Image (tube, grey):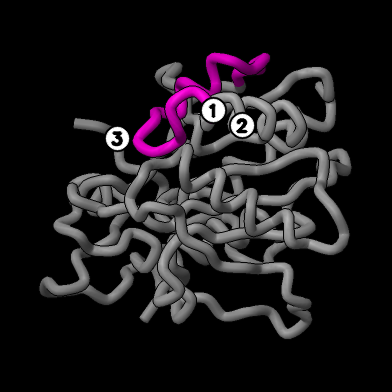
Amino acid sequence: MEPLPASGVSSLIGTPRPETPELVFDAVVLAGGRASRLGGFPKPTLRFGGATLLEHALGAVDQARAVAVVGPETSAVVVQPPPDDDGRLRWTLESPRFAGPVAALAAGLAALRQDPAGRAPWLALLAADLPRAREALAPLVAAAAAEPGVDVVLAEDDGGRAQPLLALYRRAPLERILAELDDDGGLADRPLRHLVARLTVLPLRLPPGLADDVDTWPAAERWGIRRPEGPGSVDPTGGA
């Protein structure tokens, strides 16, 4: 049996984060998908530590200049915009729907191109199913600031498995490779490894648990996340 993750999270939305070198980046958060292994229940709306998983993801990228969430706008009801929000958060969908993470990433980038401030040189990409998203992303931001020559700082879990949906990508090579893939058969249903294989990668091994996601109900239960339709579905770490 896998060890239980630590209860709660030490960094919720709006709490201080460790000091890291300054890095100018935008962010794409993937909050769509069929969630077939959860019986179709939308993962971003699951609650952990008093917040939804989507709110944890948005908290992780609160230093991003602009953020695109790729997912249905119905997910917006779980997000409480900060009072000083200036429109930096936008919603979009991949086309066609459920066309995979590469197509969703491209849709997020297209939404960010509408930003009148221009394009940040780096892009954070993360899925909205990481209970410890803030803690996981912070060392990647620091590594990208320290190693500007690489194309992507790619998280690895404690078992050494690459996590391309938890990474910092340098914007120019990322957009170039996406265009090449689009010309070479399109982006729909492509695995992210086709993208990462064409980039200069700096792998970064994360401490145990930081890169763990919630893909199944057993995985959710290891975090103390109950099935919302089942008994005892109140968030055990303080959420409603």
Please tell me which of labels 1 and 3 falls first in the chain. Answer: 3
**Residue 76 showing in the rendered view:** yes
Distance (Cα) linking label 2 and label 1: 6 Å
Q: Quadrant of residue 166?
A: top right
Q: In the image, what residue type sits under mark 1?
A: Asp
- The residue indicated by pointer 1 is 183
- Residue 9: x %, y % from top left: 50, 55
Q: In the rendered structure, which disc, 2 or 3, sits on the residue that comes first in sequence?
A: 3
Between circles 1 and 3, the one closer to the viewer is: 1
Left or right, 22 with reference to 53: right
Residue at x 77%, y 46% (from the top left corner) = 25
Pointer 3: what residue? 3
Left or right: residue 89 versus residue 96 is: right
Q: Callout 1: 10 Å neighbours few (<14), some, many (20+)?
A: few
Q: Residue at x 88, y 43 (%)?
A: 22
Work out which quarter of the rendered image holds the C terminus and state it: bottom left
SS for callout 1: helix
What residue sits right under mark 2 in the picture?
Answer: 179
Q: Number of callouts in the render?
A: 3
| Secondary element at tag 2 | helix
> What's the amino acid at mark 3?
Pro
Callout in the foreground (2, 1): 1
Span highlighted in magenta in the image: 183-203
Based on the picture, tell me whether residue 119 belongs to the magenta stretch. Answer: no
Q: Position of residue 122 (x, y in %)?
A: 76, 39
Q: Nearer the viewer, residue 192 or 37?
A: 192
Residues 120 and 138: in front is 120
User: Helix, strand or loop at disc 3?
Assistant: loop
Looking at numbered disc 2 in the image, what kind of residue is underneath it?
Answer: Ala
